[in-house]
Image (cartoon, rainbow, N blue to C red):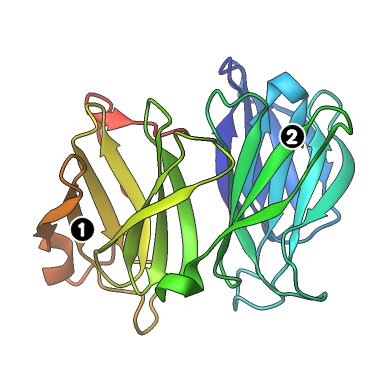
Amino acid sequence: MGEDVIFSEDNSTWYLTCMGSHKVIVGSVKTDQIKQIIDLPAIYPHGLSVHSGIDRILTTSTVRASDLGDPGELITVIQKSTGKVIGSIKVSNKASPSSVAPVEVLFVPGASPPVAYVTNMFGGSLWTLPWNASTQNFDAAEAFDFGTIKAGVPLEIYFNDPVTRMYVTTAKPGHMHIFDISGAPAKPKFLKSLATGEGVHHTAFTKDWKLAFVQNTLLNLPGMSEGNVTVIDLETQKVVAQIDTLQKAGYNPNLIVLLPEWNSLAGH
C-alpha cells in the first residue's frame, strides 16, 4: 500500500512509504528505476521526510490500513546516504504501547538547526523533533495538545513561504489550526482555529498566500466524511466560502492540489 511519496531537495530521487509491507522504496527521478528498498522495523509507515543536510530520513509508524488497528508510537530514523536504519524515537509520554499513531512528519523549511514536526493521529498531539548536533540525534518533545481546544485526529502540516506560520488540520471535528512559529521554529504559538467541515484532511494554498482550500473528507465514517471544500482567506483568517459541487453529486474528495500556476508547495 503506497502512501506518501516525496522528492529529494535536488529532485533527483523519490521516496515512497509502503504501509502494507513496511518498506521505503527509493527510486531515480530520471529513469524511474528503483535504487533501493529499505526494510523498516516499525510497521505501517505513512509519513516521510528527508533532510540531506543532516543525512536523515524520518518515517512514521501509523496504523494498519485495513482497519486502523495496531497503532504505532515511533518515528524511524534512517541514514539517507546508506539507507541504514539507525534508530527510533518514541513520540509519546505515555507508557508503551501508547497507540498514538504518528501519521505525518515534516521538516521546517530552512530551519537551523533542523527541526521536524509530527502529528499524532490518535494521540491528539503535535510533537517537535529538533536536531541535536552534539548527539547526532533528535530531542523529541510534545509541542501542543489539541485536546486543550477540543480538537482531535490531527493530520496534515503546512508552512507558509516566510516560515512564520504553520497550519495543521484536525479531522474530528474538522478544523484548520494556525500557529505562529516566527519566534522559534520548534516552539509554536497557537493563534486560531477555523471550523471547516467534518473530516478535514488535505489543504491547497495559493502561491500569493491569500487563499487556502480545505478538503473535508478523511474516511467514510460518521463525522469524518462531509465531502465539501472550505475556502479560507489567509489574510483575514476567516472562512469565506464552501464549495459543495462534489458533495451534492455524492462524491467524497480524497485529495486537493491546485494547478501549478496557483499551487504553493507549503513546505512539502
Question: What residue is at 72 percent from the left and 65 percent from the top?
Answer: 92
Q: Given the current orientation, which residue lies at the most extreme bottom position? A: 222
Label 1 Cα neighbours within 10 Å, binned few <14 / some 14-19 / many ≥20: many
Question: What residue is at 24 percent from the left and 44 percent from the top?
Answer: 212
Q: Quadrant of the N terminus?
A: bottom right
Question: What residue is at 66 percent from the left and 70 percent from the top?
Answer: 100
Residue carrying label 2: 131
Label 2 Cα neighbours within 10 Å, binned few <14 / some 14-19 / many ≥20: some
Residue 85 picture location, percent across and down: 87, 41
Residue 256 left/right relative to 82: left
Residue 166 visible from this viewpoint: yes
Residue 215 left/right relative to 92: left
| Nearer mark to the viewer, of 1 and 2 | 2
Question: What residue is at 56 percent from the left and 66 percent from the top?
Answer: 121
The dot on residue 136 is none
Q: Which amino acid does label 2 sit on?
A: Trp
Q: Which amino acid does label 1 sit on?
A: Val
The dot on residue 229 is 1
Residue 139 picture location, percent across and down: 77, 45
**Which of the two residues, 227 or 145, is positioned nearer the viewer here?**
145
Dot 1 or dot 2, earlier in sequence: 2
Residue 170 left/right relative to 94: left
Q: Is mark 2 on a helix, strand or loop?
A: strand
Residue 220 picture location, percent across and down: 38, 77
Residue 254 visible from this viewpoint: no
Q: Is mark 1 on a helix, strand or loop?
A: strand
Q: Residues at badges 1 and 2 in contact (C-beta under 8 Å)?
A: no
Residue 146 left/right relative to 80: left
Give above or below for 36 relative to 87.
above
Residue 15 picture location, percent across and down: 65, 35
Give above or below for 262 relative to 72.
above
**Which of the two residues, 122 or 47, is positioned nearer the viewer here?**
122
